[in-house]
Image (tube, grey):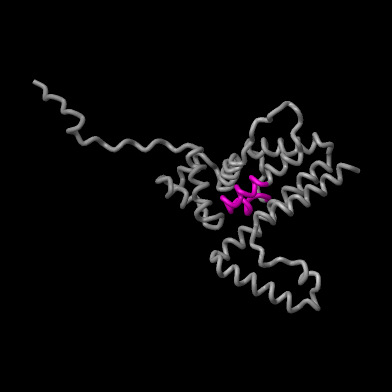
Amino acid sequence: MSRPHPAVWLRDEPPPRRPRLTRERITEAAVALLDAEGVPGFSMRRLAARLGAGTMSLYEYVPAKEDLFDLALDTVMAEIDLPEPATARPPDWRAELTRQAVQSRRVMRRHPWMTELIGTRPLLGPNALSRSERFHAALAAAGFAGAELVAAAGAVSSYVHGYVVTENVWRTRMRDPAEERELRRRAQEYLAGESGRYPVLSEHSRLEDADFDAGFRSGLEIVLDGIAARLTR
C-alpha cells in the first residue's frame, strides 16, 4: 500500500531554479552598476556578482564589456520622452530642440556615467537613433540641410554635453551647500578686489549664483538664438 502524498504545506520544497540570464536582465544590472560605481568601477566580475552568476556566463549573452556600454547607453536614452506628434505638421524646431535638450540634461544628471561614454561609443541603438531622428527632423523642417543641419544639431548637443560634464564634476566635489556658498562668496570678493586687472569679469560675473537650471536655460536660449539667426539669412 502506497504512502499518502503529504500536503504541500507539510513538505520542504526545493528552492526554485534561478531563471537563465537574459540580455535585458544583464543590461538592467549594468545600468545599476554604472550608476553606483561609474565607468572606472565597472567590470564584468562585479556585474556577475550582482547577478549571482559566473563571470564567463555573461559572455554567452554579451561578448565584450564595450557591448554592455552600448546597451546601457541606449537603455537610458529611452528615459528621454519621445511623445507622438500632436499633429501631422512638422514640429516647431525650437520647442523640439528645447524639450530634448532639457530632458537630456536631466537624464545625464541621473546617470553621470553617460557623459563619459557619449563620444566614445557610437550611438546607434534604436532609442538613441529615434531621438536623434526627431531632433534632426525638426531642423530639417525649419530649413536646414546637409552640413549646416549636422552643425546645428551638433551645436546644441555639444552645449548640453559640455554643460552637464561641468555640472556633474562640480556636484561630485561640492556636496555641502554652505561650503559652496562660502567658496562662491570668496571668489566673487576676490574678483571685486582685482577689478583693475579684470574689469569685465569683476563687473559681469555672478559667481554667487548657483542656479544651474537658470544658467542652462539661458545658455541654451543663446545657442538657439544663433540657430534662428542663421535661418534668417
Secondary structure character of the magenta stretch overall: helix
Q: Does the segment drawn in magenta span residue 194?
A: no
Could you say which quadrant of the image residue 87 lies in? top right
**Closer-to-camera residue (166/33):** 166
Q: Residue at x 69, y 67 (%)?
A: 207
In the picture as drawn, the residue positioned furthest to the top comes out as: 1
> Horizontal and vertical percent for residue 195?
78, 76
In the picture as drawn, the residue positioned furthest to the right comes out as: 233
Q: Quadrant of the N terminus?
A: top left
In the picture as drawn, the residue positioned furthest to the left comes out as: 1
Q: How many marks?
A: 0
Give the residues in magenta. Answer: 102-119
Q: Is residue 17 above or below residue 68?
A: above
> Horizontal and vertical percent for residue 146?
83, 39
**Closer-to-camera residue (125/152):** 152
Q: Quadrant of the C terminus?
A: top right
Q: Does the segment drawn in magenta span residue 104?
A: yes
**Closer-to-camera residue (13/187):** 187
Q: Residue at x 61, y 50 (%)?
A: 108
